[in-house]
Amino acid sequence: MCLAIPGQVEEIFESQGLVMARVNFGGIRKSTCLEYTPNVSVGNFVLVHVGFAISVIDEEEARRTYEHLALSDGLEELTTP
């Protein structure tokens, strides 16, 4: 099952003409496309689905979602290559 996982934007950069970010998912950092969320800033929390940030959420919502995913083993896709 594919889920949207919350993470915090640590860095924004351009790669091959796309706006990208380094997003921290509880200590695991991954590159994420920001093309669908153009108003994101460093420090914002985003929901990420298959490598794309699909919405900006507040810190409390990110924390709650992350906790629920951790309890249900929904974070395993972060460690899958």
Image: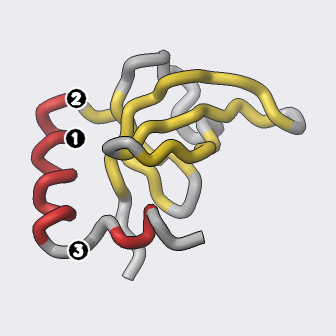
Disc 1 to disc 3, C-alpha distance: 16 Å
Q: Tell which tag, 1 or 3, sits nearer the viewer.
A: 3
Q: Is residue 70 above or below residue 39?
A: below
Q: Which residue position is annotated with label 1?
A: 62
Residue at numbered disc 3: 73
Q: Nearer the viewer, residue 27 or 59?
A: 27
Q: Check if mark 1's residue and mark 3's residue have beta carbons within 8 Å.
A: no
x and y percentages locating residue 75 in the rendered image: 32, 65
Position of the C terminus by quadrant: bottom right
Where residue 35 appears, as percent x and y from the top left, is 64, 38
Q: Secondary structure under badge 1?
A: helix
- Relative to 20, does residue 2 appear above or below in the rendering? below
Front-most of residues 27 and 36 = 27
Q: Position of residue 40 (x, y in %)?
A: 48, 23
* Residue located 18% across and 63% down the image: 70
Q: In the figure, 26 relative to 22: above or below? A: below
Q: Is residue 27 left or right of residue 68?
A: right
Crowd rating for badge 3 (residues with CA inside 10 Å; few <14, some 14–19, many 20+): few
Q: Amino acid at mark 3?
A: Asp
Q: In the image, which is nearer the foreground, mark 3 or mark 2? A: 3
Q: Which mark is residue 58?
A: 2
